[in-house]
Image (spheres, rainbow, N blue to C red):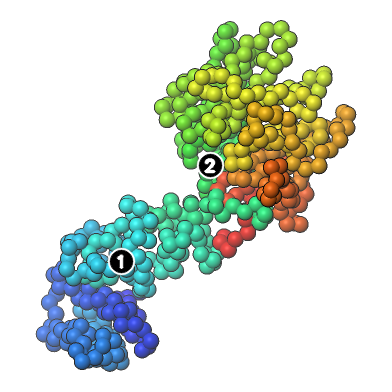
Amino acid sequence: MTLAQVLISGSFESKEKSSQHILLKFRSTLGIINSIKTNQRPPLLTTEFTLLEHLQNSITKPNPLRNNSIHHHRQTPFQFETTITFLSLFIQKNMPPFSQSGPLSVAFAHNNHKFDNPKHHSSTNVVAIDVGGQLFQTTKQTLTLAGSNTLFSNLFSSYDQIPFIDRDPDLFSILLSVLRTGNFPSKAKSFDIQDIISEAQFYGIDHLLVQAHSNPSQFDAFNLEKSTILPLSGRDLPSVIATSPYGSAHVAHGSKITSFDWSLRRKSTILTPFTAIDSLLSLSSNVVAAGATDFSGLQIINLDMGSVVQSLNWENMTRSSSTVQAIGTSPEFLFTSFESGRRNSNSIMVYDINDGFRVVSEIARNEIFGADLDSAIPSTKLNWVPNLNLLMASGSHSGPSGVSGNIKFWDIRSGDVVWEIKEKSDCFSDITVSDTLSAVFKIGVNSGDVSYIDFRHIDSDNSWKSLGDTKKIVKGKKEGLGCKIQSNGNQVFCSKEGELEVWSEVFMGGSNERVFRKNLLGRTKDLGGNRVTNLGFSGNKMFVTRKDQQSVEVWESSRRGF
């Protein structure tokens, strides 16, 4: 847009426009004039300079006998528009391009105005911005939400004129809405997400898009539906998923790890030294911990570099190699379950995440002698329970008498077991813990039932309570084999063959018994499919992999955005 077009677009179109809006437009024009004079542009001719003075006086000196409406100024709106048009044509013809029509950061860097400029309206909280010829008004508090190292932080610098940003006003309106509400407006679905990301990077607020687009508060289990299929390269099937808090995911398939960013538009794949990866945990946006039951040591991998940056190992009394059975994490520690290569010992190592993975302690060490079956079971799942400040370590073993296992809650400071559950009759096929619901949940391998133990009654009763109707166990039949269970927020998600279901607590007045209700996930078109092999949650998304499918399903809550 040319300078003349910008000025003409700022002319007054109807009497319904407020005097404040018109004065803001006029101050922008005066700012151009002042910039021309301040930056030593060619001197104006006497007649044109007289015209500018006349224009300024006619607008800024209202009739003292009338109110401050624009319609009571000395010039009528039609006369004002004519004058502005003539002035803009003159500036366009005789003056070089306006010095501050480039990026806003550059303009502010050369601005000599100070905060104490008496001409700046420092007493008001309203800030006006001209983006691509369209005027926007917001508050200083809204712009503060962008952060201190963004272009918006410079808008607090005093200005005699409205700052101009030569960018797309439609995209800017979306970003301003994100600043105001923390969410994408409905009109955002009309744009490509990559265009919005690029625009946000220009202003330095792309980090806010991550929270707006993948905010966990937007997760609605009862409104989930299959939204996207993420294909994986190569021929290997996905073995494990690792998610980060805001919508990104890492998927292990064969010896490769494929990463998807929060927008699910950027995809990258790296090769690892593994033949196949069995355990994967996201430590940051670009660092993961990976292990396998047939590969020695836990590998810390930088995904940007595509290489192992550190290897963590454990040795038993015979100093044999060790393989990784499970990985877990807390805000401070990384937990790794190791088993010796000869399978005659196992242990859980605790590392400090914030201190170069320094060894903090070793717990649950077992040296197996004879037929001590309980000691022979390594922990195959590690879950941190923040409210209890305990680590839940669980493992199971299939033998001639069926499947047996144990669940232990460890105090990592003392290295002691504070609570233990031994599984024999209907051992867990899969298990999870919910800090929000204060309970541990399992799917019975024989019955397929979903059951729980309440942490609030942990000392008085260690028996499992079924969430639904208890099924009769049929000898030799394993209804829960291969089923998955995972907690997210205040709900528990389960897979049984190809179906997905969610359990939610229902509060019943006057009853001490906890009540849970089941709902099937998805619309009719989403039901069924191959057996679910992995469940993962990140932000407002659920990630699902299925047997014999070389892809990842993304489930999202139906919303007005993308």
Quarter of the image holding residue 472?
top right
Pointer 1 residue: 125
Residue that appears at 26% across and 85% down: 68
Q: Nearer the viewer, residue 421 or 281?
A: 421
* Residue 176 point in image, percent of width and height: 42, 63
Q: Are marks 2 and 1 in contact (CB under 8 Å)?
A: no
Residue that appears at 78% across and 43% down: 468
The C terminus sits in image quarter? bottom right
Numbered badge on residue 244 = 2
Q: Nearer the viewer, residue 110 or 175?
A: 175
| SS category of the residue bearing label 1 | loop
Residue extending furthest right? Answer: 475
On screen, residue 72 above or below 215: below
Side (left or right) of 476 relative to 215? right
The N terminus sits in image quarter? bottom left
Side (left or right) of 348 relative to 357? right
Quarter of the image holding residue 129?
bottom left
* Residue 49 point in image, percent of width and height: 14, 83
On screen, residue 145 above or below 417: below
* Residue 234 appearing in the image: no
Q: Nearer the viewer, residue 319 or 353?
A: 353
| SS category of the residue bearing label 2 | loop
* Residue 47 appearing in the image: yes
Quarter of the image holding residue 441?
top right
Q: Nearer the viewer, residue 224 or 311?
A: 224
On screen, residue 333 above or below 249: above
Residue that appears at 64% across and 27% down: 459
